[in-house]
Image (spheres, coloured by chain):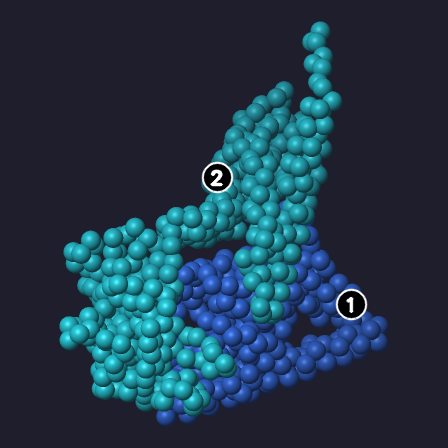
Amino acid sequence: MQAQKTISPATFIFDGAVKNTWRFFSSIKLALALILVISAFSLFGTFITGVDVFHSWWFLTTGALLILNIIVCSLNRWGNIKLSLRGGSVKQDEGFYSSGACNAEIENVPKPDYKASRIPVKVLQKHGYRVRIENHDSNYYFAADKNRFFRLGTYASHLSLVLFVLAYLIGSYFGFRDTNFTTAIGNTRPIGHNTGLSLQLVSFVDEYYADNMPKDYRSQVILYKNGQQVKQAVVRVNHPLIYKGISIHQMYFGPAAQLQITLNGQVLYQGNVAIDKLISNQGLQRYVGSIDLPNGLNIQLISSAINVQDPLIPLGQLAIYVKQDGNQIGAGLAPKGAAVAINDMELTYQADSKFSGFQVSRDPGNNLIWVAATLFILGLVLVLYFPYRQVWVLYQTRAAGTNLLSLRLSTSRGLNGTSELKILVDKMEKELLPKT
Amino acid sequence: MITNLENISLLLSLAGIVLSLLFTIIAFIQHRRAILAGQNKVEKSEQPPDNSNRITNFIATASVIITLVFVTLTIISRGIESGHAPFSSMYEFAVAFAWGVIVFGIFSRWRYKTAAMQNIGLIVALLLLVFARVEFAKPANLVPALQQSALLSAHVAAAVVAYGTLTIGFGAAILFLIQNRRHSTWLPDADLLDTIAYHSVTIGFPFLTLLIILGALWANIAWGRYWSWDPKETTSLVTWLIYAGYLHARVVRGWKGNKAAILLIAGFGAIALTFFGNFIFNGLHAYLK
């Protein structure tokens, strides 16, 4: 006699808790409830502005629970699918063949057993079924199945959902995304993020249709790696520049000012400054550009207020603020073409130019997204269009000429197998019964 | 010339649908009368063959085919004029959506030997074409984001198949709910309606998935981000979730009948919200307004 294993109450409670948790997460009802909640949250996030639903802890937690649910459900189904791949028992009880929604009988088979028993195998194999046979007493048992490997499609689809989330996490933790990377024409700006890359904007063009709708905007850029040119390209909407996992997308554009700064007659700065940041002050919205110079100097250029008349900065002029180590040391208004003296500096707003706004990003999860998408579609096609079918056949030998063939068919995915069964039965009848 | 052809085709499509629906109603009345007359007769076999019903049905069917020809002509003439697939305005997409609904309506009629879903599809197509007529927009120049013809054509083609088949599924779900209560001889059997609804989801759902994936692919090329929680993206995700829920409920939990039909109606509601979302929300698809 086997000795009873004693377990402690703590282990008993723990085991029970694990089992209950597993059962909870293996429920399709939970999946449906979570789908409903996510749909409701998504609609809430769409209709209600001002609440970032999609990055809230409650939305992300619901998503995480669904993923956990998918993983547990998938693991739970493995035993069943493994059995389908291997094939379950061939011999079934007699009552089994006449139960279920889809069954048929062929009575009074006159052929001798050794011939008649081959017919179901022949017909089923012709229809793509794998057939296994057992012979018990004077009866023949057949178990046939079709598309068993396509049952794995469910793993392809559900695994891909996990991969989507994984791709998102990889992108978030190992990638970066600068959505406001601006460079004025002629300027070179380091991309940062330990890439060693810098981007120079050589030229920028914006074109419009006759009805003023935007037609094209394109940036001619040069990419440098540690000071060495590595790529030249024209970046446009729908035509990003991609270099070793770094993507540069054309996003927007705006004004820049060509500025010259001299200090005691020496040129301190000559180039374009992107006027790219929107600030609000006393109900007025103005764009601001900024450059840092040696010795803690910072120059800010502020353009006239948008859409309204600016009481402080006349249209076409720039307000210039000079700061040193964070303290303002001078300010002035600069009309185009005229030099403005601030302390020992002379600042000239020489001409208008443009800046181009890019998104610079690296998303190591990106390729995984497309793998997951392909896997999802593939899994879906396998599962939906190649349904798993099983046919069980019992051939009972009775008195001469009264042998009985019983068939039962079952399909997965709630499909109706009546027409398939009819085709199989018709073909078997044709071979088994005498021609009338 | 082409614009005239487009306008005339659209108007004739509308007329074709109205004619088909009208003759379907007449056929229904004739069918009811025949049943009542049959009940009054002692011997049913004494009834004369009902030729008028056959003629009415023929006119209804011919009108659907003619409608399809004219909707196709509308899309082709617009395509010639604009130089691209119908993806740049709500007008263009509404006509394409109507085309999908009519095609899959005819397909369902051929496949299941019943015009019931086709007729529900025709009502949806009629509403879409009226909407298209009201929202008529001349072919506009493509803004930079839309200059991605191949991908957007595939995106819209997937939408036409997905929305077309899922509308037929919606029709089957509506008819199921009616048939489940009324047991009408005019309508198909409730079990068949349930099966048709399921079949339409098995076609529509993969295309709905493809639609979202192609949209994400385009967004990644145009904006460097495959998903932005843009309202149209979000409502399409909600639509996808509802149909995914339907498939799981039906296949794993064995949901059939009323519960499954209600889910399909909710799914179609989500499609309508996604489609008309441009008028409610701003977002990356706002140019379609």
Q: In which quarter of the image is residue A14?
A: top right
Q: Nearer the viewer, residue B29 or A152?
A: A152
The residue positioned 57% from the left and 76% from the top of the image is B280
> What residue lies at 69% left-to-right and 23% top-to-bottom?
A11
Chain coloured blue in this rendering: B
**Residue A388: quarter of image:** top right
**Residue B167: image x %, image y %?**
58, 68
- The mark found on residue A149 in the picture is 2
Discs 2/1, front? 2
User: Mark 2, chain letter?
Assistant: A
Find residue A121 and report its horizontal and vertical position in percent: 51, 34
The residue closer to the viewer here, A4 or A217, is A217
Name the image quarter holding the N terminus of chain B.
bottom left
In the image, is B120 to the left or to the right of A200?
right
Q: Is residue A351 left or right of residue B84?
A: left
Instruction: Give A175 or A161, whichever is nearer the viewer.
Output: A175
* Residue B225 locus on image (x, y percent): 41, 61
Residue A373 is tagged as none
Residue A399 in picture, x, y percent from top left: 67, 26
> Would you say residue A163 is visible in this rendering?
no
Residue A292 higher or lower than B92, as above or below: above
- Chain under numbered label 1: B
Q: Colour of chain A?
A: cyan
Q: Which residue is drawn at 23% across and 84% down?
A: A339
Q: Which amino acid does label 2 sit on?
A: Phe
* Label 2 CA crowd tier, 10 Å (few <14, some 14–19, many 20+): some
For label 1, the crowd category at 10 Å Cα-Cα, with few meaning under 14, some 14 to 19 and many 20 or more, is few
Q: Is residue A20 left or right of residue B288?
A: right
For marks 2 and 1, give the CA distance. 43 Å
Residue A317 to residue A204: above or below: below
Q: Which mark, by number, is residue B182?
A: 1
Is residue A48 at least partly visible in the picture? yes
